[in-house]
């Protein structure tokens, strides 16, 4: 794991990564609870689409953890390798562009993962 900012590749340190891992775990638990409740209540297929929201929380946390890159920081042009919440600004336009592209890529990956999880819930037999 890098402990320095690498444009478009790594914009968070160990503390921030742990925070995103926690988000992924919470999102995963919420996804499983939601899935169980939807199945236990014989929810309609349309109602099962609500699984997308907790699945998205899980997916964003998980992808950010794997990439060691914060989606929001990438869009804001910031990074953090110090104390939680102490942000530094990205220096150049080129670095901001690399970070923005990585943030978009992470968002797309998270949406695809959340849609796949939602699809499993949607098509799961009662």
Image: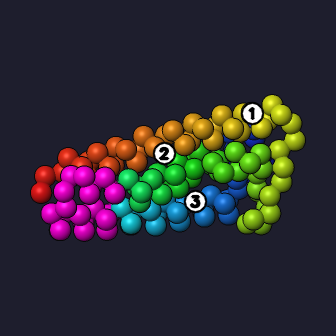
Q: Which mark is residue 110?
A: 2
Residue 2, image x, y percentages:
71, 47
Q: Which mark is residue 18?
A: none
Q: Which mark is residue 20?
A: 3
Q: Is residue 8 left or right of residue 48?
A: right
Q: Is residue 114 left or right of residue 42?
A: right
Up-down: is 31 above or below 89?
below
As for residue 40 lying within the magenta part, the answer is yes
Residue at mark 2 to residue at mark 3: CA–CA distance: 13 Å
Residue 115, image x, y percentages:
37, 44
Region in magenta: 32-51
Residue 37, image x, y percentages:
25, 68
Up-down: is 47 above or below 91?
below
Residue at mark 1 to residue at mark 3: CA–CA distance: 23 Å
Q: Identify the mark nearer the N-term, 1 or 3.
A: 3
Q: Nearer the viewer, mark 2 or mark 3?
A: 2
Kind of element beneath mark 2: helix
């Amino acid at each position: 794991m890098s402990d320095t900012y690498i444009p478009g590749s790594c914009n968070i340190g160990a503390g921030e990564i742990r925070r995103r891992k926690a988000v992924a775990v919470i999102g995963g638990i919420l996804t499983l609870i939601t899935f169980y409740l939807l199945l236990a209540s014989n929810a309609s297929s349309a109602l099962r689409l609500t699984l997308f929201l907790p699945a998205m929380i899980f997916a964003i946390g998980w992808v950010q953890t794997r990439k060691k890159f914060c989606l929001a920081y990438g869009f804001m042009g910031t990074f953090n390798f110090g104390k939680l919440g102490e942000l530094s600004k990205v220096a150049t336009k080129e670095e901001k562009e690399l970070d923005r592209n990585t943030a978009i890529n992470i968002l797309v990956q998270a949406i695809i993962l959340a849609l796949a999880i939602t699809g499993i819930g949607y098509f799961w037999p009662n």
